Amino acid sequence: MTGSGGYRSMDSVSGPHAGQPLLTAGAPALAANAALVACHGRGATAQGGINLFDPASRHGVAVFAPQADRSRWFPRPASASRSANEPWLSSSVDCVAAALEAARAIDVPSERTVLVGFSQGACVAAEFVRRNPARYGGLALLSGTLPGTIDELGSTSIDGSLARTPVLVGYGKADPHVDRAGVAETVRTFERADAVVDERCYSDTRHEVTDDEFAAIGTLLEEILND
């Protein structure tokens, strides 16, 4: 990926992730016509998230990657109750908000911003959109679901419309970290909020990102850039 890079402190974030860096890459502010918010997985870094999603990026796309404290967004499994992962979960949602605000500061609105996350990062991106329904350029949940127990997910609703936001839910059939019931409830929740959900299950794939998923994210960005 070519373009500018740098970082800033996420001073607007409260809780465990307060003051962590927000890395930037890709198109410089004056050349950015779309944005990608990249949420890394557990044990990874913001720079690792930028590197991971590089195959999906395109010219004209500014990339914003928040960093989790100690490289974990929340301490317990995503399938634990939401309260068991507080205050980390709410703090992680604040990090995504800080990234979107950085995109808006360079005149890239939410409807031209694609949010992506892998593993824990996918759970964070999903939870942000659940709490902040709006029209986004896209949401890509890779090997992750909405956080919460199955009972919580079964009663989850989104208080607002996603206004036809495209949502990619991708996971490996052999992934031991992705609960299929959680996937089903995540898809249901977003569809009921007027999202256009594209669920993709990959056979013989474990906890990883596929070339097909990179291509799908790239297509979302191209549609924004060509609009």
Image: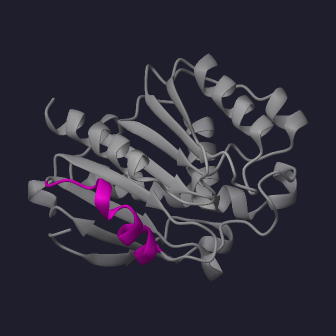
In the image shown, does 94 or 123 lie closer to the viewer? Answer: 123
* In magenta segment, residue 185: no
Q: Which residue is drawn at 13% across and 33% down?
A: 226
Q: Nearer the viewer, residue 145 or 19?
A: 145
Residue 25 locus on image (x, y percent) = 26, 69
Query: Residue at image x 49%, y 57%?
Result: 209
**Whether residue 109 can be seen here:** no
Question: Would you place residue 30 above or below residue 220 in this image?
Answer: below
* Residue 50 figure quarter: bottom left
Residue 85 horizontal side relative to residue 60, left or right: right
Q: Is residue 50 magenta?
A: yes
Instruction: Tell me the quarter of the image containing the N terminus.
Output: bottom left
Q: How many labels does the image show?
A: 0
Percent across and percent down for residue 160 are 58, 22
- Location of residue 38 by image quarter: bottom left
Q: Name which quarter of the figure residue 18 lies in.
A: bottom right
At 70% from the left and 37% from the top, the residue drawn is 183
Q: Position of residue 105 (x, y in %)?
A: 27, 54
With 128 as the anchor, is 102 left or right in this view? Answer: left
Q: Which residue: 36% across, 44% down? A: 217
Can the viewer see residue 153? yes
- Most extreme residue toward the right is 151
Q: Main secondary structure of the magenta part?
A: helix
Magenta region: 46-59
Spot occupied by residue 225 in the image (x, y as percentages of width and height): 16, 39
Eyeballing the image, is 39 above or below 165?
below
- Furthest residue toward left: 31
